[in-house]
Every structure is written in structure tokens, then in C-alpha cells.
Amino acid sequence: MSELETREIRLNPIVPTESVLVATARSMRPKKAEDLAPRDTRKHVETCPFCRGNEAKTPPELFRMEAEDGNWAVRLVPNLYPVLGDDRENTNFTFGLQQTIDGYGRHEVFVDHPDHGAAIHEMSASHLEKVFRAYRMRMAQLYESDPRLKYVLVFKNFGPAAGASIPHTHSQIIAMPVVPENVQAEVINSAEYFRKHHRCIFCALVDEALTFEATIYDRASGEIRRKIDVGQYVIERSQHFIAIKPFASRFEWEVHILPLVHQADFLDTPEDWLPDLARIMKRTMARLDAVIGGAQYNFFLHSVPHGGPAEGHAASYHWHLEICPRTSIPTGFELGSGLFVNTISPEAAAKKLREAELEE
Ligand SMILES: [Zn+2]
Ligand SMILES: [Zn+2]
Ligand SMILES: [Zn+2]
């Protein structure tokens, strides 16, 4: 699409109730990244509990992955301030219309790298592979540990703009007694699509990105309103994975990574795909960093739930990694309407990301 102004509401194809206002007019632009606190880029911080040499300052380690030099590469420790814990008996109760489910669960922290401020794209692919292997190992262990755990979420907040309270690079794993609503909505809606079309909607989106080409004309004037090109939304493609800019991106620089062939559960990813996943992740993050500069972001891993009403959707659900760089602060309009506002057209953002030059 040209640099023409875009002003339209785009529906998320998987969860249509989640819509985005793509409005590229300057007046829509809220507070931008340059006003946000920068991320911590230091390599070592004496007082940081996650830096090498300070291992005794964290709660007892749950496991570690070792680097080639025998030092630790990734550590898993319990969260000092867990949002969910297993320290109490089940106390579900209902009072009038109010209900609670006990905040039972686990909340742990992966120290992703010994270097304090290491960004994902600065880590080696072999290191990132260890990070993904650690995620997978712990997810499997947590699901096996207790049938009350219905969902295990892995996510990362990187930089103060993304809500990271500890500056040392880390990701988190939360095992919870409920399936989060947004995952549930994806699971239920994709199952509905599967019932109607006999295929996975995520696979359909990947195919569409790789094969779809169209020109849409304005009925009255006959002018071209939109051109959709093959590959317009593709940021990176590797042997087993693809990185896509969603058509209805909530965040300006949002990118999703998903397996090219159908796979519902991250835990079923073959071991020998992990190096490829690490590479595409590193390249995608390097592109984001090159374009935004000092990217601060949240990413989360959405994989098929192992419990609750959302269980058993192996054919219709497709695991993916949602990377959401934070370049603006939500405004009252966004919070009040629930409508995300994206001020850069996803087509233009995808083009920029694709054209970014990477140092090999
Ligand atoms: Zn540190
Ligand atoms: Zn699929
Ligand atoms: Zn998702």
C-alpha cells in the first residue's frame, strides 16, 4: 500500500471481538518511545541478584543450563514475589455474585543470560536455543506436576516500557489454575473456524501470507484502494518457522512467529527444530531493534492448554509467539474503548522490518 493515510478498524481474524483502529494520521500519535525510560544496557551490575557471582542472592535455583565454559547460561529460580503460589489450601468460594478461585499456581523466573542488559538479538543463537529448551522443559514439568494447573504461560517483559521491574534480562513462567481469557478466546474461535472450514485458521493465515495477491478497487471512482501482495506481511521465513506482521496488529511493531506446518503444542516441537527457532527469533528481534532502536517489548508464548474447557484442540489450535514492542503508552481512548490504536500501517511496518539491514 502507498503512504496514503490509513483509517480503518481491522478485526483480528482469530478473535474478531479484538479489533484495532489503524489510524496513521499524525494527530493520533500518543506518547512515543523517546519519552519512555531507556533500558539498562550494562553488562554487569554488582548489586544485581541475577548477575553472575550473585547466585546466592536469589531463592534456591530450580535448575540451570550450562554454557560451554561450564558456567551457567540460563537459571530458573522461584519468583520472590509470586503472583500465584502453592502455599495455601484450596479456598474457592462464592458469595452472592462474587466468586473467587484460589490463586494457586507457580510463578518462576528464568534468568535468560548472565549478562545483565543482554537483548535477545545480542544473544548467540546457540544460547537462545538453550533458553527455548529451558522453557519447554519447565512447561512440561509444571503440567505434569499437578492436574490443577490448566495453563502454563511463558512471557518476557524487556525494558521499563514493557513493565520489567528487574532490569536484568529475564523471562517468567506462570502456571495457573485457569486458562487466561485471551488464550481461551483464541482456542474457542479457532475451533469454531475448524468446525466450519475443516482446517486450522493459523495454517490458513500462513498460507494466505505466502500465496495471496489481490487488487481492490474503489467502486465509485475505479481507483485502486488496496493492493495485497504475496509476502507483504512476512518478516522472516526459515526452514520450520515464519515471522508475520499481523494484518490487525495491536502494536505498531508487533510480530508473530509460528511453525510453518501445523503444531498445536509447543511441547511437541521436535528437538531439532529449536536451533531454527532460535535463529528466526534472533533475526526478528535484530530487525525490530534495527528499526525501532533499543526495542522494549513483551513477548508471550501461546500454546494449546493442557486442561479446562479449552483442552483437546490439537487440530484447530496452533502455537505461536507474540512479540509486542512497546513504543507508546495506551491512552484513555484505548483503555476506555478496549480498541487498540495503531498509528503505523502494518504493511508499512512490515516493509521497514523486511528492509532492515542485519549484521551477520
Ligand atoms: Zn544483572
Ligand atoms: Zn495450524
Ligand atoms: Zn496468541
Image (cartoon, helix red, strand yellow):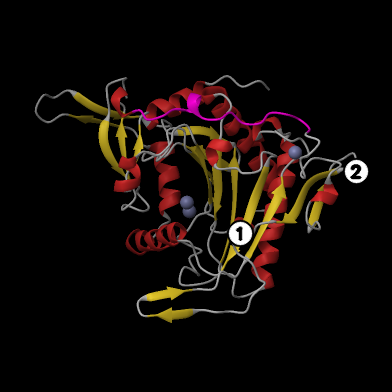
Q: Quadrant of residue 86?
A: bottom right
Q: Could you tell me residue 128's position as x and y percent?
A: 71, 41
- The reply to whether callout 1 and callout 2 are in contact (CB within 8 Å) is no
Q: Position of residue 204 (x, y in %)?
A: 41, 48
**Which quarter of the figure is the N terminus placed in?**
top left
Where on the picture, by quarter, is residue 10? top left
What residue would you read off at disc 2?
70
SS class, disc 1: strand
Indicate the position of residue 13 as horizontal and vertical percent values. Answer: 35, 49
Any part of residue 155 in sight:
yes
- Residue 114 location, quadrant: top right
Mark drawn on residue 174: 1
Left of 106 or right of it: where is 337? left
Q: Main secondary structure of the magenta part?
A: loop
What amino acid does circle 1 point to?
Ile
Q: Which residues are magenta?
A: 29-44
The answer to which of 360 and 196 lies nearer the viewer is 360
| Identity of the residue drawn at 71% across and 46% down | 131
* Residue type, label 2: Gly
Quadrant of the image for the C terminus?
Answer: top right
Q: Residue at x 35, y 30 (%)?
A: 343
Residue 274 picture location, percent across and down: 68, 46
- Which numbered disc, 1 or 2, marks the residue that appears first in the sequence? 2
Element class at badge 2 = loop
